[in-house]
Amino acid sequence: MRHLLTVAGRVPRASAIALVPSPAAARNEALDVRGEEGWLSLLTPHILPLTDMQITNLPTPALLLDLDRLEANLARMAQRARALRVALRPHIKTHKCVEIAERQRALGASGITVSTLYEGQVFAQHGFDDLTWAFPVPLTRLPQAQTVAQGARLGLVADTPDTVAALERFGHPFHVWLKVDCGYHRAGVDPCAEWSLELARTLHDSRVLRFAGILSHSGHAYHARSRAEMAAAAEEERRIMTAFAARLREAGIHVPQVSVGSTPAMSVVERLDGVDEARPGNYAFYDYTQTVLGSCAVTDCAVTVLASVVSSQPGARHSIVDAGALALSKDTGPEHGPHRTMGEIFEDYDRGRLRADAHLISLSQEHGVVSARLPVGEQVRVLPNHSCLTAACFDEYHVVRGHEVVGRWKIWRGR
Ligand SMILES: Cc1ncc(COP(=O)(O)O)c(C=O)c1O
C-alpha cells in the first residue's frame, strides 16, 4: 500500500513523499489507533525514499536530525562505555525513536532505559526485551506495568518504603531497582540512612519482588562550571554508589547491579570501577547546554529546529519565527552560559558557528522572539537548549544528510 503525505492540505513542493511500508511499519500497525490513511502515514516510522528533498523545501517548524552526527555520537559513547568496562543502557527518553534505539542496540547496548510506561510498551512491541523504567513507579500504573513485564524484562524503580510495600501487595514479581541519591537531591534514598539499608533488605528478602540493584542519576553534573567539576560529580556518584553497594553487601544483601549515569558525567568520567552499567541519554543529540558544559562541541549537536521568520516590522529591533515553546520547550538553558538564551541560531551549521547577532530571547506558545530583525521568509536553524524536551514537542524527525532530507522517523510520545 502506498500513501501520499500531504502537509497542510498540499503536497510539499519538491516531491510527493511516497511512504513504503517496511517490516518496522508492519510491526507498528498494531499500535496505530487512528487507522485513517493520512494519519497512518504520519505514524509510520521508517526511512522513506525522498526524491531530491532539500531542507529548504520543508514546511516549518521542522525537527531536523543530522544522521552523520547522530551515528558519530552513538559510536563514540558505545566506545567510551567499552573502554570504561560498563554496559551501556541508553536512556531513550531523549529520542523516543525506534530507529535510533535499533542503532544503539547494534552498537552493543545491553538494554534500554525509558522514562514513561508508554515508551516501555512501544519499545517492547518493537522487540526491546530488557527495559528499565527509570522513574519512581506510580502505583496507578502497576496493572499496565504488569502487562509490559509479561513480554519483556521490565525493571521498576522505587525509593520509598510505601512503594515497596504496595509492590509486594500487588504481587507481581517485578524487578525493582532501589534509587539512590548521589548528590542531585531529586529522588533516591539517602545512602547513609539506616532505613535505606533496611529498604534494600526488604527488596532483597522479598518473596514476591526481585531486587535488581541500585541505581542513580548524576543530574547535579548539570550544575558544573567546568569539565573538572563534571568529572568531580561523576566520581562522587561512583564513590557513593560503590560505597553503598559495599555497605549492603557487608550486611548480607546481594546487590546484583550498580547503575549510574548522565551525559555530562559519562562524557568526562575517567573510571567506573565497581559500576556495572551507565544510562546516558542526551549524548545521542547533545544540545546547547551540553556545549556550554563542555560535554561536546557545537559540531556534535545532531538536532536542530528549522524555523521561518514570519514577522519583521520596519523600525522593530526583533523578529518572530515559527518556533515557540511548543517547538523548543521553555528550558532556560545552561546556568553558566555567556548570555541568557531560549535557543541559539546557526550562522554556519556545518562549521558549528552560532550567530553572535541573533538568538531567541523569549518564547510563547508558537511565537519565538529573535533578538534581531531578520527578513520575513528567511529560514533559521535553531540549536535548542535541551534536545530531549525539543524532540518531545514533535511527532517526527526529518532525517538529513547534509542538506538533503533522507527520511522521516516517528517520535513515540506518550505517557
Ligand atoms: C534516572 C535517569 N537516568 C538517566 C538519565 C539520562 O541523563 P542524560 O539526559 O544526562 O543523559 C536521566 C535524565 O534525566 C534520568 O532521569
Image (cartoon, rainbow, N blue to C red):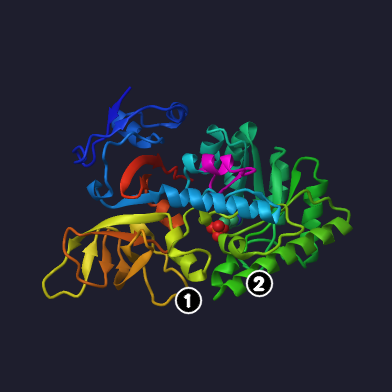
Task: Say few, some or many: other residues with alpha carbon within 10 Å of mark 2 (under 14 / 14 to 19 / 20 or more).
Answer: some
Residue drawn at (71%, 38%) of the image: 171
Residue at mark 2: 232
Tell which quarter ligand 1 is in.
bottom right
Task: Say few, some or many: other residues with alpha carbon within 10 Å of mark 1 (under 14 / 14 to 19 / 20 or more).
Answer: some
Where 364 sits versus 8, above or below?
A: below
User: Which residue is the extreme one toward the top?
Assistant: 1
The part of the image, by quadrant, that contains residue 29 is top left
User: Which residue is the extreme one toward the front?
Assistant: 351
- Classify mark 1 as within 8 Å of ligand 1 or not, answering yes or no: no
Dot label at residue 336: 1
Residue drawn at (23%, 72%) of the image: 372
Residue drawn at (26%, 72%) of the image: 371
Residue 136, x across and y down, in percent = 62, 53
The amino acid beneath tag 1 is His
* Quarter of the image with the N terminus in it: top left
The part of the image, by quadrant, that contains residue 50 is top left
Q: Element type at marker 2? A: helix
Left or right: 319 in relation to 69? left
Residue 292, x across and y down, in percent = 47, 70
Residue 111, x across and y down, in percent = 62, 43
Residue 180, x across and y down, in percent = 69, 60
The amino acid beneath tag 2 is Ala
| Camera-side residue of 356 and 59 | 356
Q: State how far apart marks 2 and 1 are (Cα).
A: 17 Å
Left or right: 409 in relation to 9? right
Decide if residue 278 is in sight here.
Answer: no
| Camera-side residue of 279 and 327 | 279
Q: Element type at marker 1? A: loop
